[in-house]
Amino acid sequence: MTEKLSEATRGPLLDPLFQSGWALVEGRDAIAKTFSFTSFVDAFGWMTKVAIWAEKWNHHPEWSNVYNRVDVLLTTHDVNGLSALDAKLARKMDKLA
Ligand SMILES: C[C@H](O)[C@H](O)[C@H]1CNC2=NC(N)=NC(=O)C2=N1
């Protein structure tokens, strides 16, 4: 069962993500990042690769694509906050970008 990150566990998990451009979201227990690509096709191709991992892990982003930009927000709806799955998907998104 997925659990909401505690104050003690979230630091080590989230700090590396803050270093790579992720940030906490005002008013939600969530992290967000904007990914920019060289073209729409590159942005959409990245979204497709991420989508395969999201489906495999049954953990899905809240995201929006405009041309070469993808705005991403990650949170775990089942626990109404951040979980280890969000950090895991964020790391995968960074790796695939
Ligand atoms: C029923 C299904 O397993 C759940 O709704 C999954 C699907 N993907 C999900 N994605 C995210 N971000 N949070 C969830 O709690 C979640 N739950």
Image: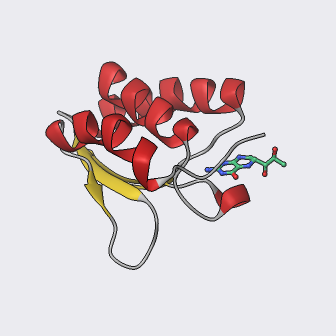
- Say which of 83 and 8 sits in front: 8
Q: Is residue 87 visible?
A: yes
Count of numbered labels shown in the rendering: 0
Place of residue 51 in the rendered image (x, y in percent of width and height, measured from the top left):
58, 32
Q: How is the image coloured?
A: secondary structure
The quadrant the N terminus occupies is top right
Q: Residue at x 18, y 36 (%)?
A: 20
* Residue found farthest to the bottom: 27
Residue 94 located left or right of residue 72: left
Q: Is residue 66 visible?
A: no
Place of residue 29 in the rendered image (x, y in percent of width and height, measured from the top left):
46, 65
- Say which of 16 and 44 sits in front: 16
- Say which of 25 and 12 sits in front: 12
Q: Residue at x 68, y 59 (%)?
A: 79
* Residue found farthest to the front: 8
Place of residue 42 in the rendered image (x, y in percent of width and height, measured from the top left):
31, 29
Identify whether 44 is placed above or below 95.
Answer: below
Identify whether 4 is placed above or below 19.
Answer: below
Q: Residue at x 50, y 52 (%)?
A: 6
Place of residue 9 in the rendered image (x, y in percent of width and height, measured from the top left):
44, 42
The quadrant the C terminus occupies is top left
Q: Quadrant of residue 96?
A: top left
Q: Residue at x 70, y 23 (%)?
A: 56
